[in-house]
Image (spheres, rainbow, N blue to C red):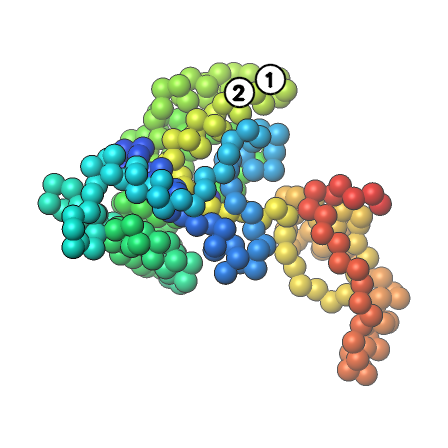
């Protein structure tokens, strides 16, 4: 997930511009102010799998570095001006968002304004925004994707889809070295040999800044439920969701009786220890 650039449109065909935006996207601030620190910043396309390159550094929020990159790309601010300009035009962008997403991206809007970029929202309902994204009718937007245990980067990253619409390569990524690695990855059937190839793919894709990486949740699912169930040791698998309890959980008679009494008496249930074990690493 992250802020996404349509590289078929100027100036987003310039990696300096995309990297500058990445340095202006303050994921840590959003996590702290809006998300109750429930998420983690991304530095990979293959989060939570061995295919994620462990050596890739996070992109830091750094307005000074961003401004240096923007200046290098020819965008400067004249004395007395509010916005950066180039060839007589101010730096103004249209940011495609779904209804209600201004709650999140208004902070990004303010951080861009501080360095001299005017960002206006192209806001519509979520279905309309996604439709425009898939048709590549956007300048900049936000988008997130899910993935499997065995990554298949071809659809999102291979150059043969760069000019197509209704594909997951919404940024029109087309990097020859990356294309060759994806072809090599697809031909390799040994999972262990695939991992180092995927690390190279991940690093190149990340550092091309077609995405200014956003955030993800380091757990499988969040659910609210009455405390009357017996739960397997691992609770819900990483790919589980709200349907898992239907087949995996059971009603614990003792817990159910305790809950019923508490509801009848309008009393509190005894507190249980909260366990944060995203990766099922704690001894049982």
Count neighbours of disc 2 (C-alpha within 10 A) and say few if under 14, some if 14 to 19, many if 20 or more.
some
* Residue sitting nearer the eye, 167 or 151: 151
Q: Quadrant of the image for the C terminus?
A: top right
* Residue sitting nearer the eye, 103 or 22: 22
Name the quadrant containing residue 230: bottom right
Q: Is residue 83 above or below residue 213?
A: below
Measured as percent of width and height from the top left, residue 29 is found at 48, 54
Label 2 SS: helix
Instruction: Return the residue at label 2.
Output: 197
Measured as percent of width and height from the top left, residue 175 is found at 36, 24
Name the quadrant containing residue 171: top left
Which residue is outermost to the left?
A: 88
- Mark drawn on residue 86: none
Residue 116 in sight here: yes
Measured as percent of width and height from the top left, residue 191 is found at 62, 21
* Residue sitting nearer the eye, 115 or 58: 115
Image point (86%, 71%), residue name: 257
Q: Is residue 246 above or below residue 42?
A: below
> Is 262 positioned to the left or the right of 8 in the image?
right
> Is 211 positioned to the left or the right of 94 in the image?
right
Instruction: Return the residue at label 1.
Output: 193
Mark 2 vs 1: CB contact within 8 A: yes
Q: Is residue 134 above or below residue 111?
A: above
């Amino acid at each position: 997930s992250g802020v996404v650039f349509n590289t078929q449109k100027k100036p987003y065909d310039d990696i300096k511009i995309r990297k500058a935006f990445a340095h202006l996207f303050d994921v840590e601030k959003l996590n702290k102010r809006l998300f109750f620190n429930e998420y983690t910043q991304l530095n990979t396309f293959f989060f939570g799998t061995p295919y994620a390159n462990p050596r890739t550094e996070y992109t830091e929020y750094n307005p000074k570095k961003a401004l240096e990159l923007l200046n290098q790309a020819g965008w400067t601010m004249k004395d007395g001006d509010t916005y950066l300009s180039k060839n007589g035009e101010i730096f103004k962008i249209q940011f495609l968002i779904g209804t209600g997403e201004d709650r999140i991206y208004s902070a990004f809007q303010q951080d861009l304004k501080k360095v001299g970029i005017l960002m206006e929202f192209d806001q519509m309902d979520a279905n309309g925004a996604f439709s425009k994204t898939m048709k590549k009718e956007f300048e900049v937007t936000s988008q997130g994707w899910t993935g499997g245990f065995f990554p298949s980067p071809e659809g999102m990253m291979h150059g043969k889809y760069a000019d197509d619409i209704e594909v997951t390569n919404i940024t029109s990524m087309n990097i020859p070295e990356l294309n060759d690695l994806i072809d090599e990855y697809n031909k390799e059937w040994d999972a262990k040999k695939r991992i180092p190839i995927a690390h190279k793919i991940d690093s190149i894709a990340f550092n091309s800044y077609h995405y200014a990486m956003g955030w993800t949740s380091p757990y499988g699912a969040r659910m609210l439920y009455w405390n009357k169930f017996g739960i397997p040791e691992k609770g819900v698998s990483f790919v589980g969701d709200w349907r898992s309890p239907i087949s995996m959980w059971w009603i614990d008679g003792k817990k159910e009786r305790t809950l019923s009494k508490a509801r009848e008496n309008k009393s509190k249930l005894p507190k249980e220890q909260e366990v944060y074990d995203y990766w099922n690493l704690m001894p049982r």
